[in-house]
Amino acid sequence: MLRHALFLAATISTLSSAAALGADPVDFEKQILPIFMEHCAGCHGEEKGAGKLRLHTVKTIQEKLAADEHLIVAGKPDESDIYKRLVLPTDDKKRMPKEADPLPAEKIELIRLWIEQGATAIIAAAVTDNPAPPAAEMPQELPLPEVAAASEEAIGNLTAAGAQVLPLFADSPLLQVSFALGSEPANDESVALLAGVAEQVYSLNLAGSKATDAGLGVLAQLKNLAHLHLENSTITDAGMAHLAPLSSLQYLNLYGTSITDAGLASLDNLKHLRKIYFWQTKVSYDAAMALEGKTPGLKVNLGFDHPVVVRNRLTKELERITKQVEESTASEEKLSKQLEEVKKQKEAVQKRVEEINKELSELDGKPAEQAAEAEKPAEGEKPAEGEKPAEEKKEDA
């Protein structure tokens, strides 16, 4: 779960590595999606979703990724199921495409490189991909903002301060900025440099930053910010107030921070929020669920080990097991009745077997006079030569 929570941080890291090696960023829409549509959509597309996996849009991929974090592990193709299944031996039942020739090597390599670079185009494209009309209660998804390019000086200042700055996707003026991989945690001075690219920052990673609440005030200027990582940072409830103006914010990670229920008030009017991580914070279950309830489409994650989450999970499991016990008990009673009937049938058969054996035994042991009578020759029949008549046999006796 933590690895999934740090998805964008890993993405920025791997994209930066690819850029340093001179690799061109892989374009999801132009290069990866056509592969999925040609080779995968028959079983994993709009009409059919084998294994609950659909690969015809970014949104459907993200929905599956939310339930299965091993589908795509940013920067790690060898740990990503979507890639691993492409390179299994041909006789392996899990190899994909199923019952078809393996993908051409160059297409497999393209998918590998795409994942290695972080698959960030999915994040970028997701905000424009809307294959089905949104539900009536769901707010419209935001289009990508149109902005002018940031100045080279402003980007250079951030880079000099230890930040990694990358375009959101090829030729985009929107930026991904990360301080998470610098040699030193971000502080007030380095965070203040964001003011120079305030309009262009679309994704910001301040995981582990040591900026003060006052120093985070620059965040309020990032009007186009959609993804914000603050996990393991020093933000408190006071610093949360700087997030209130971020009307475009869609993703917020506050894992491992000291925020409490009081800080959630700053998020009440952020109607485009879709995911928030409160794992290992002091936010209560009730407050988190209240926020989720008042924001259509929002999913709040308190972590698998939150006491209430654990209780709810165990309660559901108990309900499921209790139902199984009830069904098993009913089956047991039904089988018991059937067993009683079988026992009665068996007893009846055994009794009949005994009766038949008794009759056969009586036939084998007839009284002597019946046996003698049976040995008398028929009337008019002479005794065999050398044999005495029956009367003489009696006298001799």
Image (spheres, grey):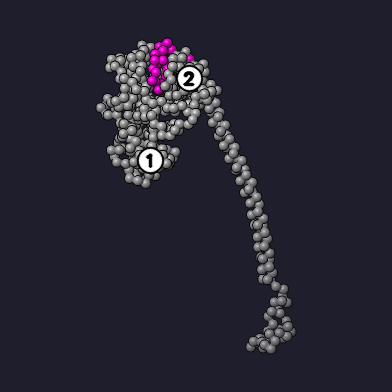
- Against 140, residue 218 (above or below) is above
- Viewer-nearest residue: 60 or 379: 60
Mark nearer the viewer, 2 or 1: 2
Q: Depth check: give the residue in front, 62 or 351.
A: 62
As measured in the structure, the alpha-carbon distance from the residue carrying label 2 to the one carrying label 1 is: 38 Å
Residue 70 in sight from this viewpoint: no
Q: Position of residue 155 (x, y in %)?
A: 30, 17
- Rate crowding at label 1 as few (under 14), some (14 to 19) or many (20 or more) other CA atoms within 10 Å: many
Q: Which residue is mark 1?
A: 41
State the residue position of label 2. Answer: 269
Residue 228 is a magenta residue: yes
Based on the picture, tell me whether residue 209 belongs to the magenta stretch. Answer: no
Amino acid at circle 1? Ala
At horizontal 32% and vertical 41% (from top left) the residue drawn is: 103
Q: Is residue 27 visible?
A: yes
Q: Eyeballing the image, is 346 above or below 370?
A: above
Residue at horizontal 39%, vertical 31%? 129
Expressed as whole percent of the image width and height from the top left, the position of residue 33 reads: 34, 36
Q: Residue at x 39, y 35 (%)?
A: 57
Q: Which residues are magenta?
A: 213-237
Q: Is the residue 381 above or below the residue 289 in the image?
A: below
Q: Residue 301 has which mark?
A: none
Q: Position of residue 75 (x, y in %)?
A: 35, 29
- Please state, as top left, top right, bottom left or bottom right, where the N terminus lies in the image: top left
* Residue 30 quadrant: top left
Label 2's element? Answer: loop
Earlier along the polypeptide chain: callout 2 or callout 1? 1
Looking at the image, how many numbered discs can be counted on the residues? 2
Front residue of 346 and 38? 38
Tell me the kind of residue under disc 2. Asn
Identify the image quadrant of the C terminus: bottom right
Bin the neighbour count of mark 2 within 10 Å (Cα to Cα): few under 14, some 14-19, many 20 and up.
some
